Image (tube, rainbow, N blue to C red):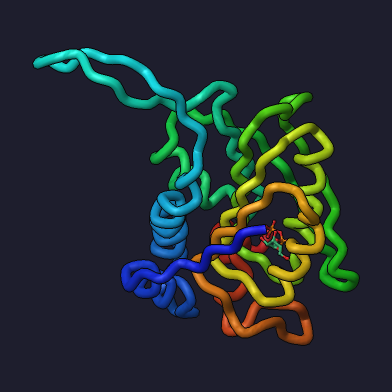
Amino acid sequence: MRVFVADHPLITHKLTVLRDKNTPQPTFRLLIEELMTLLAYEATREVRVEPCEIVTPVSPTTGVRLSEPLPLIVPILRAGLGMLEGMVKLVPTAEVGFLGMVRDEETLEPTTYAERLPESLAGRQCFVLDPMLATGGSLAAAIEFLFARGADDVTAICVLGTPEGVEAIRKAAGDRRVTLVLGALDDGLTDQAFITPGLGDAGDRLYGTV
Ligand code: PRP
């Protein structure tokens, strides 16, 4: 598994405002989307393309276009939904599938409550979006789900991660092709398995405590 942790002053600046407990919900939503767009640049570095020919107003030339099957973006509901627009802005022709997962606050076990994905993901490059990689249970289950459907290349993009979460994903990935892109690697987990210093509950800060 390959792991990339962002190292850019603009990302750190936006993350600082995101972490601040006094940042209001509209600003929080905007920042999650903006951070996603900045992380998408790194996450799509190996997006599959094929050569193509075009004609500019001046002369014929060659370039590249995204290969078929087109990439599949998979936000993990709820919090991953806040990252979707930021990703779609950069890859507007990608398809979007959905996975709904919730972590039991006591056992920390993830449950899948919704799924809308193509039956077969054979040959697909998948980009999984979830702002928080805490214990890694939810993302590991999502990655497992995608490989079980035939995906052969999964890139997960998280705004914040922990060393424990990264190790859980490394274990789940085994020798399969998985890339993890993080906005920052935080210190670890609290007793309630919240990322510390973290930013609190991303789902609640985006959508409220429903
Ligand atoms: C949060 C977060 C991740 C998961 C991380 O979701 O968005 O999906 O927990 O924890 P883990 O790495 O320990 O599995 P939550 O279950 O709170 O659902 P929500 O997005 O609907 O708020």
Left or right of residue 5, residue 13 in this image = left
Q: Residue at x 9, y 16 (%)?
A: 58
Return the x and y of residue 68 as percentages of the image width and height. 55, 21
Q: Camera-side residue: 113 or 174? A: 174
Which quadrant would residue 122 be assigned to in this image?
top right
Return the x and y of residue 165 as percentages of the image width and height. 72, 70
Which residue sits furthest right? 107
* Residue 58 in sight in this render: yes
Left or right of residue 53, residue 195 in this image = right
Q: Camera-side residue: 92 or 22? A: 92
Q: Which residue is drawn at 37% across and 18% down?
A: 52
Which quadrant would residue 7 be assigned to in this image?
bottom left
Quadrant in which ligand 1 is drawn = bottom right
Q: Which residue is drawn at 74% across and 70% down?
A: 167
Q: Camera-side residue: 36 or 3? A: 3
Left or right of residue 68, residue 74 in this image = right
The quarter of the image holding the C terminus is: bottom right
Give the number of marks.
Answer: 0
Return the x and y of residue 90 as percentages of the image width and height. 40, 40
Picture layout, residue 91 above or below residue 182: above
Which residue sits furthest left? 58
Picture layout, residue 82 above or below residue 88: below
Q: Residue at x 45, y 56 (%)?
A: 39
Picture layout, residue 114 above or below residue 209: above
The quarter of the image holding the N terminus is: bottom right
Which quadrant would residue 164 be assigned to in this image?
bottom right
Q: Camera-side residue: 183 or 84? A: 183
* Residue 208 in sight in this render: no
